[in-house]
Image (tube, helix red, strand yellow):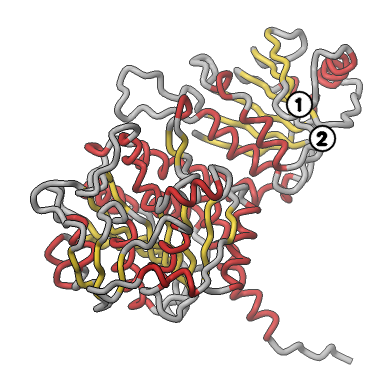
Amino acid sequence: MNFELKTLSLPDAAAHKCDLLVLLVPDGFKPQADALSVLAGRAIKDGDLELKPGKLLPLYGVPGIAARRLVLLGCGKGNAQAVRQAVQALGATLKAPSVRRVALVFARDAEAGCVGAAVRALADASYVYTTTKPKADARALSRVTVGVPGGLETARPEFSISVALVAGIEYAREWANRPANHATPTLVGDAAKALAKHAGIQCKLHGPAQVAKLGMGAFLAVAQGSEQPLRFVELRYDGAARSQAPVVLVGKGITFDTGGISLKPAAEMDEMKFDMGGAASVLGVFRALAELRPAINVVGLIPACENMPDGRAVKPGDVVTSMSGQTIEILNTDAEGRLVLCDALTYAARFKPAAVIDIATLTGACVVALGGLRSGLFASDDELAGQLMAAGDAAQDPCWRMPLDDEYAEGLKSNFADLANVAGRAGGAITAAKFLQSFVGDVPWAHLDIAGTAWKSGAAKGATGRPVGLLLHYLLASASAPAAKRRAAAPRRARAA
């Protein structure tokens, strides 16, 4: 889908030729003499248009309006959150086969963040998965014009970021939505390799033999019950000097999770294809980085495998040796995500990173704690935690910081290994994070538990692409921070007399 940002006054919008013209009307709208203003003002006065976000009035073949269809769309206070909520209400309209060109126009100057929110919401509302649905109608929408009455240069940076973010989110959704037989570890590796066609991105794939040579006994243990060979994906984006320490993103890549010998219930087990949501988000971030090319170095690590229950599968009570040398008693084979992640976290240390962030659909306990609104955030570093919280708020992809008290690790003690892979049910999301923390060392580290936010169930079943937005905003802020610090540290020149 192609996006363009354009200056469009309301008279210009009325003359703009497209299949669908959407006018975002906020509280306090004051009509002028042009046709669109008069129409919107009359609809408000007569009570046919409410300005609550998402309330809309569809019209067709309106005299004086060049677009075939017109939607007057209430957007409440007109802030980013209200705009996003409003545009999401257009879902069915945007998916109509006859709607190929859309103009989304602000009735007054857009506040900061509104243009980006509109782009992301429009892409989300019009998204259609078709990879394994050959008879489905593909997304007809091909061109979107975002019109603002003024302030074009002010809006352009957030517009560019949001267009790149849409590309990343849709790449993540594509791979998380695919059935497991269309998203095997090998195919996930191929998706990463395809990203290396973009300038600045490199990809290295490690197979079972290389992973064994690295000593990743925990990762190997999870993969050993599947006929699908594992892949350890290593992506690099080099946008800054080699001397600049990279941020390492580690994404859980369980392409299907049966639970292993600790077998899951059959109901809704099909949704365990989404258990590679962390891996999909790393792929999505790199897709967005390819568009934006920020001045930062980023490494992406994806341990990808299936968790299956055949005769070779790891058993409850087995003890394995991780890459770090620590031994792990596997009390529950369905707590496999932390096993593949712990070896990847150990591997991450070789890059001498500025920060390490792992992303995983890790625990049902996090879903119970936070539902589907916020991702769980665990962090060893207050500054990193604050930066991720701020990035989530900016991206409308929020998270919430959870505790990491040392006492929570008591339940991970084992009589037969250095630590067990599970503790009791209480505080399950926290004890999982404490397990991962044992493999991080002193580097600033954060863990995002996205079990509640990576996908939706029910009628809206499908991947969300979260937390690509949060991660990209964090990386862009990190890219600008070194330059700002250098400017602050530079000696001031005396003014000429």
Q: Residue at x 31, y 55 (%)?
A: 335
Query: Going by the image, does 178 lie left or right of 8?
Result: left
Residue type for callout 1: Gly
**118 and 1: which is toward the camera:** 118
Residue 39: x %, y % from top left: 83, 15
Mark 2: which secondary structure?
loop
Q: Of circles 1 and 2, which is in front?
A: 1
Residue 432 versus residue 465 in the image, above or below: below
Looking at the rendered structure, which numbered label has been put on residue 386? none
Residue type for callout 2: Arg
**40 and 180: which is toward the camera:** 180
Q: Which residue is mark 1?
A: 74
The CA distance from mark 1 to mark 2 is 12 Å
Report which quarter residue 489 is drawn in: bottom right
Residue 95 appears in view: yes
Residue 184 versus residue 402 in the image, above or below: above
Q: Which residue is mark 2?
A: 108
Mark 1: which secondary structure?
strand
Residue 413: x %, y % from top left: 34, 72
Name the image quarter holding the C terminus. bottom right
Q: Residue at x 73, y 9 (%)?
A: 62
Residue 182: x %, y % from top left: 25, 37
Label 1: few (<14), some or many (≥20) within 10 Å? many
Which callout, 1 or 2, points at the residue further toward the start of the chain?
1
Query: Going by the image, does 138 lie left or right of 232?
Result: right
Query: Going by the image, does 421 lie left or right of 472?
Result: left
Report which quarter residue 13 is drawn in: top right
